Amino acid sequence: MTQPRNRFARRNLIAAAAGAAGWLLGRRFVWGSTQAETPADPQAIPWSRSVPVRYQADVAVIGGGIAGVAAACAAARSGAQVVLVERFAVTGGDLTAGGVANFCGETTGQGEVFDEIVADLERFGAIAPYQHPYPKQSTRVFDHHILATVLQEILLRRGVKLLLHTPLADVVRSDDGRLTAGILCGKSGPEAMEARQFIDASGEADVVRRAGFPVMKGRPQDGLQLPMSMMFFVRHVDEQHAQAQLPEGWFEPVRAKEDLPMTSVWPNGPGSSALKVKIPGFDSTDTESFTAAEIRARRRVWEVLDYYQQVEKKPWRYDGCSPQIGIREGARAVGRYVLSVDDLRAGRTFDDAVARGVFYLDGHKPDDDKRTYILSKDQLHVPPYQIPLRSLIVRDAKNLLVAGRCFSADQLALSSARVSTTCAMMGQAAGIAAAMSVEEGCDPFDLDPRDVRRVVEERGARLEN
Ligand SMILES: Cc1cc2nc3c(=O)[nH]c(=O)nc-3n(C[C@H](O)[C@H](O)[C@H](O)COP(=O)(O)OP(=O)(O)OC[C@H]3O[C@@H](n4cnc5c(N)ncnc54)[C@H](O)[C@@H]3O)c2cc1C
């Protein structure tokens, strides 16, 4: 399902033209709509403001999840000046703010950035030992609080300019699909960041959407995305110190196991457990729906905790939930190639391969809160498959790559490739391609993909079986 170019696109054409004039006025962009625009929505109001150009980069990475961190680190390793823009206080995205705390799939051969992250977690004694991903799909649990420190330090070691608490609000683009600036909205107020190459690692394809390029979202028949899940954490205590119960009249207590939403429980270090609760039916690309998901999740967490305390008599004390609900699927860019589930099933290889996935089709049913999947159990396995560079290049853009869970794939292909290890691989490849484009004075689609692949492999990514 694609979205038509929205009014952001028209607005940005105006802003870009105004921005060019702004160069003469002391390097300020004019951001926003102008009186010249006639909005299609009669409720829309025109507005504009002049924005100082505060940052200039060879490569701008938007989103500091595992994909964005890998992209920024890889581009910096290639010698590019890199700015990484993250809306939260920490990098790591789903893995830290979302509390996921677990690497699935293969944790070796994902590239040198991922290797360095794992090595640093090992130095802290904060990650489970290596397990081969076959025949059983292995996982490596880690301490997500320590990951937040590890990620910021690797970025700083490599000279990446890191901006936290800084949402990207908009972009300035020309009508031939070239992005010239991102509009950042941190605590200093709106500021422009110019860059030669952009990487959208926002998970929701925010850059792609702000630029007005098409995206895909959800399952084909109704656009429903893979469900979100909320992580929460409990401490094991003696009965005397167990939590006060859910106050009467609050939420909808669960009294039978079959009424619980899908809940996974696993150890979270000594004397502590982590629980994951499925929250289907919401859209992380829609402000109100996303808000409703967080509210629903924080209620559901208490309902589930209350069940375990009251019915299963667990002496648990609530240690809190992750600051943000975990998002499996937001919006996916339309790239030069859309990776499909058939490619995965065939274990397809590509001449321009830059990443590899090994995880099964983990496609939770979008409209059901039980342990249900889009496919039956015997259809979940896929052999190792490759991801082409073309799936990381936004089709209608000149200088915009994507990495991580907003890359160009159908929903079922994403259900495998969204695991953090594969997102890290895509990030490293996108960072290498962006830096190479800057060095060669061209755009990512004009690169010889064999050169990108060679560097990706030289930097430790295993693309072959
Ligand atoms: C419940 C759940 C369980 C999972 N379990 C596992 C597991 O066990 N193992 C595994 O490997 N994977 C697991 N995954 C998948 C994996 O965690 C994610 O798919 C992966 O980490 C996504 O990485 P990313 O960098 O693409 O996106 P994200 O981690 O979502 O990062 C995107 C970043 O961009 C930032 N951002 C977004 N918009 C903007 C903006 N406009 N301006 C600035 N910054 C912005 C966000 O704050 C975030 O930091 C799970 C996912 C979920 C939701």
Image (cartoon, rainbow, N blue to C red):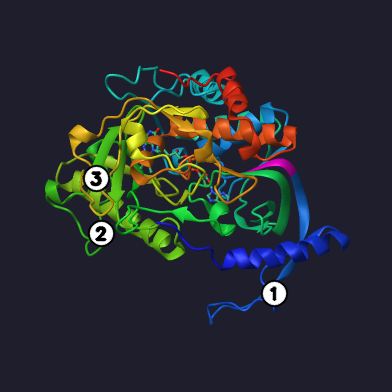
Between 231 and 283, which is closer to the camera in this rendering? 283
The secondary element bearing badge 1 is classed as loop
Q: Is residue 31 visible?
A: no
List x then y, in percent, for residue 112.
Answer: 56, 21
Q: Which residues are magenta?
A: 57-61
Distance between the Cα atoms at labels 3 and 1?
46 Å
Q: Is residue 391 visible?
A: yes
The secondary element bearing badge 2 is classed as loop
Mark carried by residue 374: 3
In the rendered structure, which amino acid carries the disc numbered 3?
Ile
Task: Indicate which label's residue lies in the foreground, 2 or 1.
Answer: 1
Q: Earlier in the sequence, mark 2 or mark 3?
A: 2
List x then y, in percent, for residue 331.
Answer: 45, 52
- Left or right: residue 401 compared with residue 306: right
Mark carried by residue 372: none
List x then y, in percent, for residue 17.
Answer: 75, 64
Distance between the Cα atoms at labels 2 and 1?
52 Å
Q: Please tell me whether residue 179 belongs to the stretch shown in magenta.
A: no
Q: Earlier in the sequence, mark 2 or mark 1?
A: 1
Confirm or deny contact between disc 3 and disc 1 (CB under 8 A): no
Between 331 and 280, which is closer to the camera in this rendering? 331
Distance between the Cα atoms at labels 2 and 3?
37 Å
List x then y, in percent, for residue 249.
Answer: 22, 65
Residue drawn 70% across and 71% down?
48
Q: Earlier in the sequence, mark 3 or mark 1?
A: 1
Query: Label 1: which residue?
Result: 34
Q: In the picture shown, does residue 134 fall above or below 233? A: above
Task: Indicate which label's residue lies in the foreground, 2 or 3.
Answer: 3
The N terminus lies in which quarter of the figure? Answer: bottom left
Query: Label 2: which residue?
Result: 247
